[in-house]
Amino acid sequence: MMSSELPISVVIASLGTDVVRNSLDAILNGTGVPEEIILSIPHDAIVADEITAKTDRLKIVRSAKRGQVAQRSLGLRAAKATHVMQMDDDVELSASGLQELWDKYQTCSVRCAIAPVFCDSENGGLLTTYSSGFTAMLKDAATTCIYGASLGKNRMGKVSASGVAFAIDPQDLMGEGLIEVEWVPGGCVLCHRSDAITDDYYPFDGKAYSEDVLHSFLWRQKGVRLFIAPHIRFRTKIEDLKISRASITAEFRARRYIRQLQGRNTFFCYVACMAWFLRYWAGSKGKRPS
């Protein structure tokens, strides 16, 4: 298979373990390959041998601060290509994925950041679908009351009054080219290097919560428009993260911060937080708030 080189620096924040191996394989064996791949790891990380031996396109930078946002920002600052694609280390591209995303980016005539749709790497299932029927209508009404979200499919691609972001359902939008949204998932996004957010913008210590919503807000504040390409699908590993007091508090803190930056009312942040704690106290086995 012939590959063409694309003017892209792929920036991956990682711990340097072999979890990133499949992602590197997919990038290097695609129909379009990037100018460079920058793997940003903690300063004390030990890089797996099978990673460093893969290609001379791979550059490794070490971050003094551990954390996805800090590591990614360091990698973006080190990028040399005219365009950058930030990517999580567990994202797997299809053989033509990078080329397809680049081709779609080329059709956009405004300053933009473009993301694909994500599927479950285990079964290929879409991560977001919007149901219909009476039960779905009740859940929809509850979501609106708790999260301050728009009704039904009107919430697709939008950030609610609680700071909770809602993804699109690609099945509803397959005839569309690019869908403009209020936020894009941070797992894989392509933009011009001059439009990249290269600051370590997450203000709290520890694991970053809702960082993609905050990142999207900063992009839009900078004049960058955000788009999803519903027909381009990448795979990612889905973790069943349980609700805990620490995760609820961290989610609330991050989302309230975002609303405050926007100069918006934080009332629904408290409503959502109360609902999450009620689930936690009731012994919910569900996933953490999303």
Image (cartoon, rainbow, N blue to C red):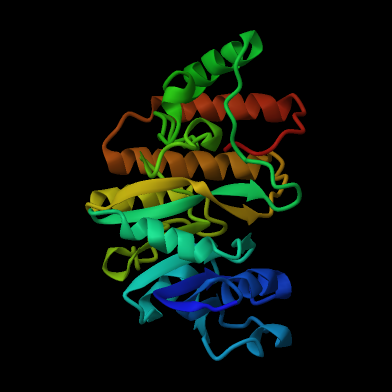
Q: Relative to 150, does residue 183 appear above or below in the rendering?
A: below
Residue found at x 41% / y 38%: 176
Q: Residue furthest top?
A: 134
Q: Position of residue 139 (x, y in %)?
A: 60, 17
Residue 148 in sight here: no
Q: Relative to 147, does residue 190 appear above or below in the rendering?
A: below
Q: Relative to 16, does residue 214 appear above or below in the rendering?
A: above
Q: Position of residue 61 (x, y in %)?
A: 50, 83
- The quadrant of the image that shows the N terminus is bottom right
Residue found at x 38% / y 30%: 266
Residue found at x 45% / y 31%: 156
Residue 248 in sight here: yes
Left or right: 122, with 262 as reference point: right
**Who is closer to the viewer here, 254 or 49?**
49
Q: Quadrant of residue 90?
A: bottom right
Q: Position of residue 258 (x, y in %)?
A: 37, 43
Q: Quadrant of residue 268?
A: top left
- The quadrant of the image that shows the C terminus is top right
Left or right: 206, with 45 as reference point: left
